[in-house]
Image (cartoon, coloured by chain):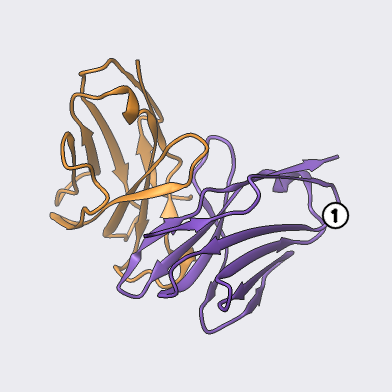
Amino acid sequence: GESVGLHLPTLSVQEGDNSIINCAYSNSASDYFIWYKQESGKGPQFIIDIRSNMDKRQGQRVTVLLNKTVKHLSLQIAATQPGDSAVYFCAETRMDSSYKLIFGSGTRLLVRP
Amino acid sequence: NAGVMQNPRHLVRRRGQEARLRCSPMKGHSHVYWYRQLPEEGLKFMVYLQKENIIDESGMPKERFSAEFPKEGPSILRIQQVVRGDSAAYFCASSPNSVPRNGNTIYFGEGSWLTVV
C-alpha cells in the first residue's frame, strides 16, 4: 500500500549543530520527492525537492539525499537555528498521479538554544 | 503559503451539524487540492478539482463529504452531519497547472481547524 514513513518522530539538536531527518518510502514507482516544513498552526511550506534521477540536491543550508536502492530519503539542515524548529514532512508523488502528494507522518525538530 | 486563502481558520461544530470550509486559490491558479491532517499525522489527499470539475476524489470519504469548485467563487469542502472523528485540520492547496512537477508551484493555505464537540 501507500506508505511514506519516518524513523524518528522527534529530533532534538543544539543550536548550531547539523540536523538529519530521515524518511523511508515504500513504492519504487515514486519518482519525485519533496520536503516540507510545517510550523505550528500553519500550512506546509516547501523546502526542497528532488527527482528520482538524482541522488543529491543542495539548497541554502539544506541538502536532500535520495537512496533509491533502499528507498530512503534524508534532509540535512546545516547550522540549525531556532527558527528551524518545526515538523518536517517528506512527500512523494508518482508519475501516474503527479498531482497527488503522499505525505509521511512527520518528524518534530526541536532546537535547543 | 502566500495567496491561498482559507476560511474560517477555526470552526467549532456540534455533532450532526454541517461544516463548510472555503478556499480561494492563488491568483491565476485553476487547480485546487484538499488535504486532511489529523493531530500528529501527515496530510492525506482528499480531492483534486478544477473549475466546475472534480478530477480525483479518491481520498474523500464516500458519505457526508463533498467538494466543489464553481466557475465563480471559492472552492468549498462540505461535511454533513459531522462526527468527532472529523475533527482535523483541512488544508487547501493550489497550483497553476495539473502536473505540478515542481513542488514550489504547489502552494498551501494556512488551514481550517475543525473541532467537533
Q: Which chain is orange?
A: B
Residue at horizontal 37 percent and vertical 60 percent from the top: A1
Amino acid carrying mark 1 in the image:
Asp
Q: Quadrant of residue B74?
A: top left
Residue where numbered disc 1 is placed: A17
Q: Quadrant of residue A28?
A: bottom left
Residue B8 location, x and y as percent?
Answer: 35, 30
Q: Is residue B59 above or below residue A77?
A: above
Residue A70 location, x and y as percent?
Answer: 58, 73
Q: Chain of mark 1?
A: A
Residue B72 location, x and y as percent?
Answer: 16, 48
Name the residue nearer the viewer: A77 or A74: A74
Q: Residues within 10 Å of mark 1 (few under 14, many from 20)?
A: few
Horizontal placement of B32 versus B18: left or right?
Answer: right
Mark 1 lies on a secondary structure that is loop
Q: What color is chain A drawn in?
A: purple
Residue at horizontal 64 percent and vertical 59 percent from the top: A22
Name the residue nearer the viewer: A46 or A14: A14
Quadrant of the image containing the C terminus of chain A? top right
Residue at horizontal 67 percent and vertical 70 percent from the top: A59
Question: How many numbered tags mark residues here?
Answer: 1
Horizontal placement of B43 versus B96: left or right?
Answer: right
Q: Is residue A90 above or below residue B13?
A: below
Horizontal placement of B54 versus B83: left or right?
Answer: left
Residue B107 location, x and y as percent?
Answer: 43, 55
